């Protein structure tokens, strides 16, 4: 960030310092100076106060490299009534994220360098979490002509995606993977075979049969997963598979990784914590694409987060206006907000039952996203960027969307009791969020 | 001698108990007699206002509800989607709240969206009756089918009923399925797999791929209407082929080991899912279904209307 | 039920033999009132009125050697308290298979109390046609009228306070003929 030159000192004192990128896990201190990590690990004792020192008592808390969400929708430009880059970046910080990647399905679409530059400027003004733009794969996300990857990367984009829309044309996907190699960026795909998924409102299965809602079969996702993996094998391009939702997808990714194909994949907190049963009663806050699947899928995805088949967790944060969700299920838009519940959902549904450790949680939310998308952060190594998340792994709270920083209120976790909460978020050595402060 | 409550709304049969369904059927029986009188009207719902809110074209269901309402002396208003602000983009919830602000007592809703009746019921105080929501449920049709079968067989327990045709898109099929299962009937479905839900095997029904097998097994066939747009959408190749492979024809019925009761929710596509000489034949109860429709709807209106429990104590004294 | 516990034990107003005698006398009085049985229809009110109408009809048939048509009337749908009555009362069968225009009807019920049931019955009968005359015969008149209605033929008159109960039992439904009176908590 531009304004880090005069950054004062930040001392995070007495927490459990957990950094899977360096194998660090001990109670101690983290010191940030000039926007960078100066020390992470053992206790420092007295620190020389050669500037404005802010000390944060982190006893009982976990201090980790900052969380990075590679998949969110900030709605600006076009739907500033629903979310802006500023409100999104503040919601991210409140959720413990020090950086987020903004998907290009705005209005107009982020498909050129000027649009990328706009997002970066807005994010700097917000001064909360970092925001990295993702450029469109095709002009206008129309699935026809390739967008100008090179210029968008030059302006600050970190990846390309037509997210929200699948890349229906296999030829376009092939070209994108080939062309992206020059810039060493991932091509992130929303895997959905459009003719199979058309008109679908939820998972195809017993619940859709009972509720009389058109279902989206697993195969709509899996056909595109294997297509993308095969195209990656053909082209050598890095394909990143967004929001995986089925057991079959996990098996296909495992197949690809075993063969050394450059495939990475993400899963959303809701797909590893909720099932299609949440749709019961036509709850539009349980409507998203891909849809919530079965308990068997959830178990397979949890296991894949544990063993690394799924590389990282991303929120697919998708705020909608209250009125848009307050309607008949089949007409309601897809998507839920996720930035401010992601950490707690993972702690409650994966760490607490003993499926993954905090070490793995920090890897999938910080180290791995940085690695996969080639972003700064994801580590507390000396000299690296001063992005740090401090969270309370034992804090219990009840989700009340009215308290969210995001403008969106569309959360399926409304009213649920969760454990785990971001207490302090530091971006570039500067505290951008403190809980109850 | 008071009836167990069936709740504020009638949204579907899936969540009713067998006792509640039986209560509605038992209540419908005396209501049949009212429609036989010279003056087909009782004062039961006098002063009550009912809105028939139809977002989807329907003639028979709306008329049946209207007769039921008028024979119980309710005041009724019909709102059709084309004639209201609904077509100007007003949301369902706004439409409903506006109606309720005019102090209505009940809404009968037909809507193309599954769950629309539930959506409305969750948001307004008035009683809501689902007259068909998308491909979800059509509970009063299910109830009138149950009543018709019960009249024929004396009971539903152990009766073998096959739902034939487009189960995937049929709200009638779902309401029948739940109602029949709850009252102890054996249920089968028969149709091309492209028109059956993928998860049909998990619904506890027998599945026949061939209509001949269904006829061999069943005591009654409930033949669902084949929406003509299913052909355009590519679910079946042609109506002609559908009739030849899945149509209920006299020739097929003549080979049955027993007389089979024939039902159809209407409107019929004669020569597609059902042949005319079957529809008009001696074992067809299709017109009984229509008669029972009015009685069942009167029973539902009667059971849902009024009866405010908070006033019940005062009334006893 | 708490309601019952608060009440004293019921006393027998009429035993089986007394019910039999009363029914025979009521049958006689109906024939006397109408000076014969020409155009006579007995309309019992669901449920115990229907049984009493059967009994009275049988007596008249035996003594007069004619057949007396009998019908059943369920007045539930004509009640004036449906909006407040709580869970919906079960609807019984109405069965009036004859045209009632110009006929002489006798409404038969077990107990006459507020008169509201009879008001509902008169409304309902008006929807079926225009009888020449309607009379009312009740086994027990317990007083406590809330409407200007009186019975033409009464089996037994007894004053019972509003909190009390009169229960008519007929052998077809209850296994025994009897009329029980409970005068309420203080008797």
Image (tube, rainbow, N blue to C red):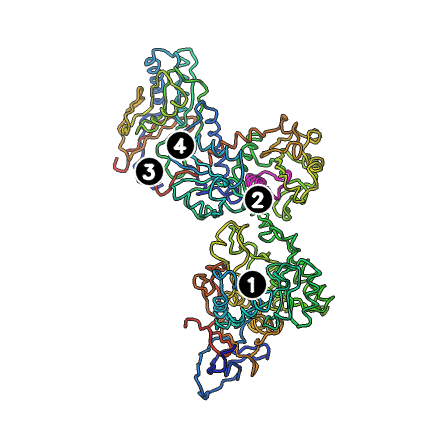
**Residue C103 in the image: above or below residue A346:** above
Q: Give SS at disc 2.
A: loop
Mark nearest the camera among 4 and 2 is 2
Asked if residue B313 lies left or right of residue B216, the reply is: left
Locate residue B279, reporting x and y percent. 63, 29
In this view, the residue in front, A263 or B193, is: A263
The crowding category of the residue bearing disc 3, from other C-alpha atoms within 10 Å (few below 14, some 14 to 19, many at least 20), is some
- Label 4 marks which chain's residue? B
Image quadrant holding the C terminus of chain B, namely: top left
Q: Which residue is mark 3?
A: B315
* Residue extent of the magenta highlight: B164-187
Which numbered disc flags the more N-terminal residue, 4 or 3?
4
Q: Are marks 3 and 2 on the same chain?
A: yes
Q: Are marks 4 and 2 on the same chain?
A: yes
Could you tell me how far apart the alpha carbons at marks 1 and 4 are, in whole angstroms?
55 Å
**Residue B194 in the image: above or below residue A339:** above
Asked if residue B221 lies left or right of residue A1, the reply is: right
Mark nearest the camera among 1 and 3 is 1
Which numbered disc flags the more N-terminal residue, 3 or 2?
2
Residue extending farthest to the right is A234
Q: Are marks 1 and 3 in contact (CB under 8 Å)?
A: no
- Label 1 marks which chain's residue? A
Q: Which residue is mark 4?
A: B44
Q: Which residue is mark 2?
A: B135
Mark nearest the camera among 3 and 2 is 2
Q: Quadrant of residue B282?
A: top right
Identify the residue at horizontal 31%, vertical 31% (top origin).
Answer: C181
- Label 3 marks which chain's residue? B
Identify the residue at horizontal 65%, vertical 33% (top origin).
Answer: B274
Mark nearest the camera among 4 and 3 is 4
Q: Which residue is mark 1?
A: A316
- Label 2 marks which chain's residue? B
């Amino acid at each position: 960030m531009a304004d880090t030159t005069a950054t004062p000192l930040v001392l995070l004192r007495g927490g459990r310092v957990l950094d899977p990128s360096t194998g660090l896990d001990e109670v101690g201190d983290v010191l940030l100076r000039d926007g960078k990590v100066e020390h992470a690990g053992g206790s420092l004792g007295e620190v020389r106060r050669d500037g404005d020192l802010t000390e944060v008592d982190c006893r009982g808390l976990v201090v980790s490299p900052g969380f990075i969400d590679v998949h969110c929708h900030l709605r600006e430009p076009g739907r500033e009534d629903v979310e802006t880059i500023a409100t999104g970046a503040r919601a991210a910080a409140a959720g413990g994220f020090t950086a987020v990647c903004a998907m290009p399905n705005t209005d107009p679409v982020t498909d050129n360098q000027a649009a990328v530059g706009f997002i970066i400027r807005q994010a700097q003004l917000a001064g909360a979490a970092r925001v990295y733009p993702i450029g469109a794969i095709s002009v206008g996300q129309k699935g026809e002509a390739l967008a100008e990857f090179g210029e968008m990367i030059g302006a600050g984009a970190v990846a390309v995606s037509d997210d929200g829309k699948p890349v229906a044309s296999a030829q376009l996907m092939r070209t994108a993977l080939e062309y992206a190699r020059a810039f060493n960026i991932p091509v992130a795909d929303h895997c959905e075979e459009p003719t199979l998924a058309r008109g679908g409102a939820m998972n195809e299965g017993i619940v859709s049969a009972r509720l009389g809602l058109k279902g989206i079969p697993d195969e709509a996702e899996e056909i595109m997963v294997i297509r993308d993996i095969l195209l990656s094998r053909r082209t050598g391009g890095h394909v990143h598979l967004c929001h995986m939702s089925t057991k079959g997808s996990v098996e296909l990714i495992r197949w690809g990784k075993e063969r050394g194909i450059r495939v990475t994949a993400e899963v959303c907190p809701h797909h590893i914590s909720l099932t299609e049963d949440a749709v019961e009663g036509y709850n539009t806050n349980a409507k998203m694409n891909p849809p919530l699947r079965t308990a068997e899928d959830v178990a397979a995805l949890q296991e894949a987060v544990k063993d690394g088949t799924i590389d990282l967790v991303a929120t697919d944060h998708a705020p909608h206006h209250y009125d848009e969700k307050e309607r008949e299920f089949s007409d309601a838009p897809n998507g839920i907000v996720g930035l401010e519940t992601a950490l707690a959902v993972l702690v409650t549904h994966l760490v607490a039952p003993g499926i993954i450790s905090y070490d793995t949680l920090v890897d999938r939310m910080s180290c791995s996203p940085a690695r996969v998308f080639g972003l700064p952060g994801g580590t507390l190594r000396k000299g690296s960027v001063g992005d740090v998340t401090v969270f309370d792994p034992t804090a219990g709270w009840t989700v009340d969307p009215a308290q969210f920083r995001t403008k969106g209120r569309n959360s399926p976790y409304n009213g649920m009791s969760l454990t785990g909460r971001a207490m302090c978020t530091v971006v570039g050595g500067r505290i951008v969020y403190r809980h109850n402060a | 001698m008071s009836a167990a409550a069936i709740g504020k709304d009638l949204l579907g049969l899936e969540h009713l108990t067998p006792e509640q369904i039986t209560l509605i059927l038992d209540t419908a029986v005396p209501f049949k007699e009212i429609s036989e009188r010279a003056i087909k009207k009782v004062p039961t719902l006098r002063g009550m206002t009912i809105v028939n809110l139809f977002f989807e074209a329907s003639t028979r269901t709306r008329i049946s509800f209207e007769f039921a309402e008028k024979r119980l002396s309710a005041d009724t208003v019909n709102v059709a989607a084309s004639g209201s602000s609904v077509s100007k983009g007003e949301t369902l919830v706004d439409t409903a709240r506006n109606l309720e602000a005019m102090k209505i007592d009940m809404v009968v809703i037909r809507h193309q969206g599954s769950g629309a009746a539930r959506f409305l019921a969750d948001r307004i105080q008035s009683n809501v009756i689902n007259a068909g929501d998308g491909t979800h449920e059509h509970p009063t049709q299910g109830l009138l089918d149950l009543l018709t079968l019960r009249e024929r067989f004396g009971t539903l327990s152990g009766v073998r009923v096959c739902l034939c045709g487009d189960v995937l898109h049929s709200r009638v099929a779902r309401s029948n399925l739940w109602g029949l299962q709850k009252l102890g009937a054996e249920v089968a479905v028969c149709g091309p797999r492209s028109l059956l839900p993928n998860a049909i095997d998990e619904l506890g029904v027998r599945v026949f791929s061939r209509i001949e097998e269904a006829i061999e097994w069943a005591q009654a066939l409930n033949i669902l209407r084949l929406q003509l747009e299913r052909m355009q959408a590519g679910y079946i190749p042609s109506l002609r082929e559908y009739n030849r492979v899945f149509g209920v024809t006299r020739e097929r019925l003549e080979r049955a080991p027993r007389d089979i009761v024939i039902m159809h929710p209407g409107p019929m596509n004669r020569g597609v899912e059902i042949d005319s000489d079957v529809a008009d034949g001696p074992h067809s109860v299709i017109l009984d279904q229509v008669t029972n429709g009015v009685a069942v709807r009167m029973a539902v209106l009667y059971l849902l209307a009024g009866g405010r429990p908070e006033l019940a104590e005062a009334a006893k004294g | 039920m708490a309601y019952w516990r608060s009440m004293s034990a019921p006393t027998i107003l009429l035993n089986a033999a007394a019910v039999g005698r009363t029914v025979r006398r009521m049958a006689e009085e109906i024939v006397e009132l109408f000076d014969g049985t020409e155009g006579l229809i007995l309309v019992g009110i669901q449920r115990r009125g229907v049984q009493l109408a059967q009994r009275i009809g049988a007596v008249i048939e035996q003594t007069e050697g004619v057949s007396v048509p009998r019908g059943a009337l369920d007045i539930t749908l004509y009640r004036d308290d449906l909006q407040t009555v709580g869970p919906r009362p079960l609807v019984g069968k109405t069965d009036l298979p004859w045209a009632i225009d110009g006929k002489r009807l006798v409404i038969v019920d077990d107990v006459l109390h507020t008169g509201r049931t009879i008001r509902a019955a008169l409304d309902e009968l008006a929807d079926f046609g225009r009888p020449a005359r309607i009379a009312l015969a009740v086994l027990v008149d317990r007083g406590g009228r809330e409407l200007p209605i009186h019975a033409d033929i009464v089996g037994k008159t007894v004053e019972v306070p509003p909190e009390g109960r009169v229960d008519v039992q007929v052998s077809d439904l209850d296994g025994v003929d009897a009329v029980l009176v409970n005068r309420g908590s203080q008797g």
